[in-house]
Amino acid sequence: MRDLDLGNGLVVPAPLLRAVTSRSGGPGGQNVNKVETRVTIEVEVGALPIPEDRKARVRERLAGRINRSDVLRVTSQAGRSQLANRDRALDRLEELLRGAIAEERPRRPTRTPKGEKRKRLEQKNRRADQKKLRGRVGDRES
């Protein structure tokens, strides 16, 4: 298994990762019935070599994938080979961790442009005029 590169010099060493294999579901004939191709990669969040504030961010953002034992799990069973599924699961875990530790840039509030407001009001007026024409002839005010 390989190390996970999370960017900014952060690396999760391979010994912290644990791969568990099991039989994959779905179609595939005898191969599915005999070979354990599903791969689950597990890593304990507390053991990750990242600062505590980022660990908290990982726990918050990936809460649905972390169990009560503080273990983050990623599973892959799309491929027909165990090796392909392991690589896919490692890539996905790396991607998830990168996204979870990334800092969100604060949103800069913007105002609606004057042209957009004007266009919206013109459309409202056009629609109102169109609906006004649907009434009886004597009811129109113009």
Image (spheres, rainbow, N blue to C red):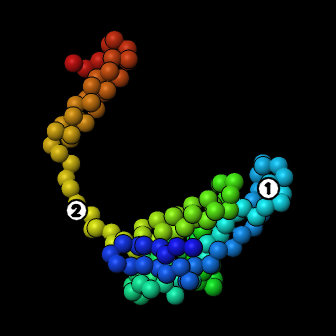
* Residue ID for mark 1: 32
Task: Tell me the kind of residue under disc 1.
Answer: Val
Q: Residue at x 25, y 36 (%)?
A: 120
Q: Is residue 7 above or below residue 33?
A: below
Q: Residue at x 72, y 61 (%)?
A: 37
* Residue ID for mark 2: 108
Q: Is residue 52 above or below residue 140?
A: below
Residue 118: image location, x then y, percent: 18, 37
Report if residue 66 is visible in the image.
no
Q: Nearer the viewer, mark 2 or mark 1?
A: 1
- SS class, disc 2: loop
Determine which quarter of the picture holds residue 88.
bottom right
Determine which quarter of the picture holds residue 67.
bottom right
Crowding near pointer 1: few (<14 within 10 Å), some, many (20+)? some
Task: Tell me the kind of residue under disc 2.
Answer: Arg
Q: Quadrant of the C terminus?
A: top left
Residue 79: image location, x then y, percent: 65, 54
Image-based side of 96 in relation to 73, left or right:
left
Which numbered disc flags the more N-terminal residue, 2 or 1? 1
- SS class, disc 1: helix
Outermost residue toward the left? 114
Q: CA distance from mark 2 to mark 1?
A: 51 Å
